[in-house]
């Protein structure tokens, strides 16, 4: 999936996990650099109804075998996005990760 375009490194940020009650475990999140990715910024929407928020979408096209989960976050170009839905594994073609960023 990295044939052409700007290839860059993104960082997958994985929380330390949860205990048997569903509470977050203490500790620092695991940070895993993933080189060879392409990022496609998506649309953004302003929510002015009761809150000053901006929601922005994006998609990362990562190399095959990239370990990313729905509860991970992804650091792209200085912004920390949430993974939106389940990442799509296209086998040897790579992994498609849809992202969402909410600010404000």
Image (cartoon, rainbow, N blue to C red):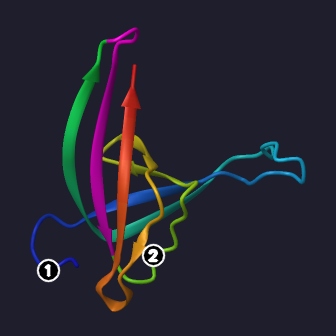
Between 94 and 2, the one lying in front of the other is: 94
Residue at 37% over, 38% down: 101
Q: Tell me the number on the disc at residue 44.
A: none
If the image is split into quadrants, where does the C terminus sit? Answer: top left
Q: Residues within 10 Å of mark 1 (few under 14, many from 20)?
A: few
Residue at 45% over, 63% down: 33
Q: Is residue 40 left or right of residue 21?
A: left
Q: Is residue 67 above or below residue 101?
A: below
Secondary structure of the residue carrying numbered label 1: loop
The tag earlier along the polypeptide, 1 or 2, is 1
Q: Which residue in the structure is indicated by mark 2?
A: 66
Residue at 43% over, 52% down: 84
Residue 31 location (% of width, % of height)? 55, 57
Q: Quadrant of residue 8?
A: bottom left
Q: Which region of the structure is painted magenta?
A: 49-62
> Residue extending furthest right?
20
Residue 48 location (% of width, % of height)? 30, 12
Q: Which residue in the structure is indicated by mark 1?
A: 3
Q: Is residue 10 above or below residue 96?
A: above
Q: Is residue 10 above or below residue 93?
A: above
Secondary structure of the residue carrying numbered label 2: loop
Q: Is residue 94 left or right of residue 18?
A: left
């Amino acid at each position: 999936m990295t044939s052409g375009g700007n290839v860059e490194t993104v960082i997958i940020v994985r929380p330390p996990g949860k205990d048997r009650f569903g509470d977050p475990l203490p500790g620092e999140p695991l940070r895993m650099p993933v080189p060879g990715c392409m990022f496609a910024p998506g649309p953004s929407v302003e929510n002015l109804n009761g809150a000053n928020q901006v929601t922005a979408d994006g998609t990362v096209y990562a190399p095959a075998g990239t370990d990313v989960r729905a509860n991970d976050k992804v650091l792209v170009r200085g912004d920390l996005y949430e993974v939106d839905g389940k990442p799509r594994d296209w086998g040897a073609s790579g992994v498609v990760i849809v992202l969402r960023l909410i600010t404000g």
